């Protein structure tokens, strides 16, 4: 069953802790993205990667980090430096074009206690 | 940077009626204009898109129209059904990224 798998679906974190969200795709897509979604707002781009071992900051990269060691995987770490990390995080992938159809995972909801 | 606005923020229509959502953008270099649908608790999914060399595109009950001169594009849904209830996002491209609108909540009244 092809698609994008995000885990965990729900995550609770204490202040001061780092947490890593997993994103795996088996669509053989080159580009992968992380978005943050807050209530009543559009999706905001955190990081994106067009190719293995390369990634670029999006509009709200501060307090986040990523890696792209394999084509299939693009994990996101929410660090303690992120001031307001409670949000819904969406991973997506697309073919070679940065402006083609995005395929999304089911999302990870992070709550900081 | 690109400024994207959607109107209305909430739209309530009677089942069977039509719905229209408008998206305005500021980057005159935008060339790709998609609409995504996100049902409650689910992931966004592309429902229709259009590129700047085309003025209108239809897919069954949904259509997108583009006015590049005025810098806006619209989503049209005809014969609305309960399963059309969702939040709809426009996301025109700017500088090789998609810039997302805040979303329009579409409510279909029985």
Image (spheres, coloured by chain):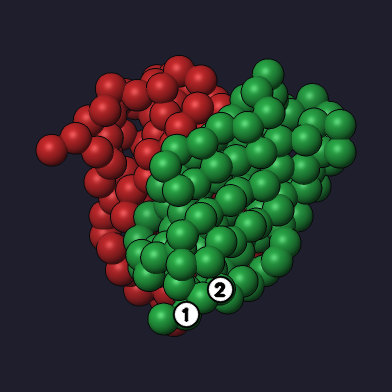
Badge 1: few (under 14), some or many (20 or more) residues near its Cα, within 10 Å?
Answer: some
User: To which residue does mark 1 refer?
Assistant: B109
Q: Which residue is drawn at 67% across and 47% down?
A: B74
Q: Is residue B17 left or right of residue B1?
A: left
Q: Is residue B19 visible?
A: yes
In x, y percent, where is residue B64? 60, 40
Task: Give the chain of mark 1.
Answer: B
In x, y percent, where is residue B26? 84, 40
Residue at mark 2 to residue at mark 1: CA–CA distance: 6 Å
Q: Is residue B98 left or right of residue A88?
A: right
State the image quarter where residue A27 is shown.
top left
User: Are dots 2 and 1 on a single chain?
Assistant: yes
Task: Give the chain of mark 2.
Answer: B
Regarding mark 1 in the picture, which secondary structure is present there? Answer: strand
Q: Which residue is drawn at 86% across and 38% down?
A: B70
**Which of A75 and A15 lies nearest the eye of the viewer?**
A75
User: To which residue does mark 2 refer?
Assistant: B13
Tell me if label 2 and label 1 are in contact, CB under 8 Å: yes
Regarding mark 2 in the picture, which secondary structure is present there? Answer: strand
Quadrant of the image containing the C terminus of chain B: bottom left
Q: Which residue is drawn at 41% across and 47% down?
A: B45
Q: Is residue B40 above or below residue B74?
A: below
Question: Which numbered marker is on residue A94?
Answer: none
User: Which chain appears red?
Assistant: A
Q: Chain B is drawn in which colour?
A: green
Q: Can residue A109 be seen in this view?
A: no
**Which of B16 and B72 lies nearest the eye of the viewer?**
B16
In x, y percent, where is residue A106? 32, 55
**Which of B103 and A70 lies nearest the eye of the viewer?**
B103
**Which of A72 and A82 lies nearest the eye of the viewer?**
A72
């Amino acid at each position: 069953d092809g698609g994008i798998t995000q885990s965990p679906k729900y995550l609770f974190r204490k202040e001061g802790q780092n947490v890593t969200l997993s994103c795996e795709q088996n669509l053989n897509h080159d580009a992968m993205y992380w978005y943050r979604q807050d209530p009543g707002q559009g999706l905001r781009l955190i990081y994106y990667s067009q190719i293995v071992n390369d990634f670029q900051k999006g509009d709200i990269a501060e307090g986040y980090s990523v890696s792209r060691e394999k084509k299939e995987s693009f994990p996101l770490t929410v660090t303690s430096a992120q001031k307001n990390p409670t949000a819904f995080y969406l991973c997506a992938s697309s073919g070679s074009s940065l402006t083609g159809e995005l395929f999304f995972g089911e999302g990870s909801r992070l709550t900081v206690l | 940077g690109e400024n994207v606005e959607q109107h209305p923020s909430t739209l309530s229509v009677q089942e069977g009626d039509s719905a229209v959502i408008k998206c305005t953008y500021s980057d005159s270099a935008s060339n790709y204009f998609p609409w995504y649908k996100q049902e409650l608790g689910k992931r966004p999914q592309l429902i229709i898109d259009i590129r700047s060399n085309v003025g209108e595109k239809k897919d069954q009950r949904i259509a997108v129209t583009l006015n590049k001169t005025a810098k806006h594009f619209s989503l049209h849904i005809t014969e609305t059904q309960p399963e059309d209830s969702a939040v709809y996002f426009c996301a025109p491209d700017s500088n090789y990224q998609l810039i997302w609108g805040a979303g329009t909540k579409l409510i279909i009244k029985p």
